[in-house]
Amino acid sequence: MKQVLIERGLWKNGLNADCQLCKDKVDDITRIDCCARRIISLQPDFLAQKSALEEAILHSTGHLCIFYPKFHCELNFIERYWGAAKRYARENCDYSWSSLQRVVPVALESVDTIMIRKFARKAWRYMDLYRNGITGKLAEYAAKKYKSHRCIPDYVLVELNKVE
Ligand SMILES: [Zn+2]
């Protein structure tokens, strides 16, 4: 890493390889030169580098791989589908290996397409709320309350923005 920074004229004497803020993954866009790891991670060619998983998907299928934001399972409808299937499995299984082998496929089938679409619409409502600056408990409330909508109506967004 040091050699790359030297070649690019970015090395400074006394620069540490990494720092606690970077180790703790503290996200702060104003921190650009706290350590060697940070400086190199902000280089355009490093920013453009895709992960091995993304590369493999792109090369083998031509598909793009887009990750959901970390720690936001509410944005991924498959989490709710998985949760519903797990609930079914819990209620219909005696926790033996043979029971699990029998129940898990049935549990996955127990969630119908209509329900999966409801989960997807709820995820869309959260995305819509976040895009409009509404987060936290207010987002949870609105995502639940406006369940007949894929997106939160504009007049509601205006009112919710007044609350925060
Ligand atoms: Zn750092």
Image: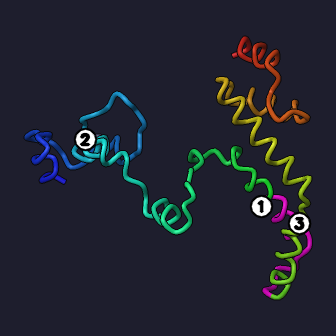
Residue 12: give x, y in percent of width and height. 10, 39
Quadrant containing ligand 1: top left
Q: Which mark is residue 39?
A: 2
The magenta region covers 83-97
In the rendered image, the quadrant that contains the C terminus is top right
- What is the distance, in whole Å, between disc 2 and disc 1 at their CAs? 39 Å
Residue 74: give x, y in percent of width and height. 71, 44
Of labels 2 and 1, earlier in sequence is 2
Circle 1: residue type: Trp
Q: Which residue is mark 1?
A: 82
Specify whether tag 3 is near ligand 1 (CB below 8 Å): no
Residue 110: give x, y in percent of width and height. 91, 66
At mark 1, the secondary structure is helix
Residue 13: give x, y in percent of width and height. 7, 40
Q: Which mark is residue 108?
A: none
Residue 42 painted magenta:
no
At mark 2, the secondary structure is helix
- Answer whether labels 2 and 1 touch (C-beta < 8 Å): no
Q: Quadrant of residue 40?
A: top left
The residue lying toward the viewer, choosing from 150 and 17, is 150
Q: Is residue 40 above or below residue 78?
A: above
Residue 95 painted magenta:
yes
Circle 3: residue type: Tyr
In the rendered image, the quadrant that contains the N terminus is bottom left
Looking at the image, which residue sits at the far front? 62
